[in-house]
Image (cartoon, rainbow, N blue to C red):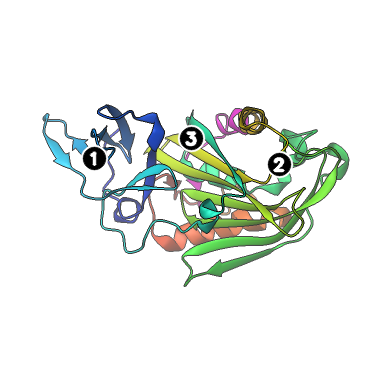
Amino acid sequence: MTKTTDVVALNDWYVVTFADEIALGHSERTRLLGQDLLLSRDAAGAFGCVMLLDDGAQVPVPQVVERYGFVWVTLGEPTRDIVSVPEFADHERKFIHRGRIGVPTSGQRIIENFFDLSHFSFVHTGTLGAYDAAEVPRYAVEFRDQDSELWAIGCSFVQPKASAVADLSSTVYYDYRIPSPFISIIYKDSLIRQGRKDVIGLFIQPLDEERCTVHSFALVYDERNSPTHILHFYHEIFAQDRSILIHQVPRKLPISPRREIPTISDASSIAYRRWLDRSGLEFGLDRTAG
């Protein structure tokens, strides 16, 4: 597959690695938006990046930023900064780097799946959902920051095991934030800190239109469990999601409502697709009419 010329996609910021995954003085190859890249880290810890062209030439990527423990790059000229996630500065929460996982589908498919409440009972039975509590209560969808962010607020669901720290089934409340087509963040009620939120997020690295690497994290209040135990819980959840995602057809996300018929519980999905449509983004989307 060839690199994209989609300006909307090029002008966004993307995570391409977790900083600790590249040792001092080392480098690794990766891919973004159909373009091969070489990431490097010098002896002082600073990151650099070059585009590897087909003729063997290397073109420097001028904007490479380390933030939240991840390395971000843009291949264009972004008009806004990397997404703000102030919770990373709250050291009372336990930071869990959930690793990077390859998924053979579009980034938008992954983001849509992440905030789809209707799949909890059938894909995550026994943890995030149950067959006898499959109804999705109504929630609100909002556009914020001059239409640059999509939020689904007031979401709730009965969950038998909402997190690694959960002992009993409970109704858990969520807010979903989509600050870019390839980023999703959940603000989820903490089960041990009343009035506080755990934060769970996905930073999608679209390798090509139908192949992605998912970089994910959690910031949780949990003094009971080890990071390894918490990580195992999240890996179990994402493994279930991945098994669904790899079988979805088409891999690119359809924009036309005639292609995949929505229901009332799909309010966030409907809003997400309309928001993507208005953005002018082409990469990873199926814009074929119904």
First in sequence, mark 1 or 3: give its number. Answer: 1
Q: Is residue 248 magenta?
A: yes
Amino acid tagged 2: His
Amino acid tagged 3: Thr
- Give the structural element (helix, strand or loop) at label 1: strand
Question: Which sits in the foreground, 245 or 79?
Answer: 79
Of badges 1 and 2, nearer the viewer stands 1
- Residue sitting farthest toward the bottom: 146
Amino acid tagged 1: Gly
Residue at x-position 67% and y-position 62% = 153
Q: Position of residue 244 (x, y in %)?
A: 62, 32
Which quadrant holds the N terminus? top left
Residue at x-position 75% and y-position 36% = 122
Distance in Å between CA atoms under marks 2 and 3 = 18 Å
* The magenta segment: 241-256
Residue placed under numbered mark 2 in the picture:
119
First in sequence, mark 1 or 2: give its number. Answer: 1
Question: Which sits in the foreground, 242 or 266?
Answer: 242
Residue placed under numbered mark 3 in the picture:
105
Distance in Å between CA atoms under marks 1 and 3 = 28 Å
